[in-house]
Amino acid sequence: MNLQCLCGKNLDYSDEIVVCPDCGRQNFRCSQCAAPVSLDKDAVAVSCPYCSATLAKKDLSTDKLFFPISFNETNAYEKLHRFLQNRFGIPEDIATEYNPVHISLIYVPLHIYHIKSEMTHDIIEVDTKGIVASNKIWFAQNMDNYKFAVKSKIYYKQDEIKGQIMGVDFDKVTADNRARSYGYELSNKDKIRFNLHGSPNVEIKYDGLIYYPVYEIEYGYKNEKYKGIIDATNGVAIYTEYPMGRKTRYTLRTMGAAYIVLSMIIGILQGIFLWDYISTLIVIGQGIVIGGVIISGSGSRKKGSEEISSSDKKLFLSKLDNTLFYKE
């Protein structure tokens, strides 16, 4: 049976891994679905990218495995710039005044879990969760609810890479508890939808530690500097600070103040005509809180992230710069 390498070389295939004599890639067929798999010579496949069947039993916690990047620094700057231009209230001149200052490639350690949350025999939720394993990352909290693209199945095991590798100081016991809590959260929507009571049966499976690449970007606008975090595997904006335009700030402040005044008027009228002073206080209190939130959103600096509905967001792998992965 013939097997074609990704470089186009036709290979004589047996049941073993075939190394391409031209490019050195590893080539084989999945034992479950027979799909052809072609990997870089230094790549480690932990499961089939087509059917998710296990291809190599490997304790991932014993080695440093680095998830591959698909965007270089220029791409990351462009991704952030494009994201900023679509933000609500962004200054109109952001397209011309956006000034990249500094960018760093950072590898974030992640504890990977496969989670199964079962409410009944027929109502089951499953997901893959990446939990940041370092407390020293300033943007770690912003990554708590981020859907890492860790369902892709190809990693790179390297002795040397260019980029800052963050240390692991988040113990596995704590990570287990967070993964289990996430399992309970998975079933919340099912409990509401099907009017169910009780707690789900949560099973977690630890799949090891990987290092996930992100770009930390600092950019300037006018006389201020802002920070952003871009996923180096798919270009998604994980977190970013951005300026608010003057017109938007003025509009939000006006809306917030108007909401507070309107709530006070309604509350006072309700107290006068209905003699319901408790409701009056509630209406006025709610108006002050909501109006205050609107006004607080009129600050000159906003924070946001790109919404991802699923951790299955398609990941495109491309080798942009070998030096990012290994030395020849």
Image (tube, rainbow, N blue to C red):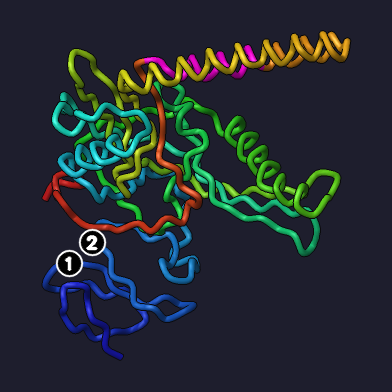
Name the amino acid type tagged 2: Lys
- The location of residue 183, given as percent across then percent down, is 66, 44
Residue shown at 32% from the left, 39% from the top: 86
The quadrant where residue 198 appears: top right
Name the side, left or right, on which 240 lies relative to 266: left
In-front residue for pair 272/294 = 272
Q: Which residue is most to the front?
A: 273
- Compared to 89, does 307 lie above or below? below
- Compared to 313, does 102 lie above or below? above
Residue corresponding to mark 2: 41
In-front residue for pair 152/73 = 73
- The dominant secondary structure in magenta is helix
Name the amino acid type tagged 1: Gly
Residue shown at 67% from the left, 37% from the top: 181
Q: In the drawing, what numbered circle is on residue 295?
A: none
Residue shown at 29% from the left, 84% from the top: 13
- The location of residue 72, given as percent across then percent down, is 18, 44
Tell whether label 1 touches label 2 (CB within 8 Å): yes
Residue corresponding to mark 1: 24
Look at the image and give the residue range highlighted in magenta. Answer: 287-299
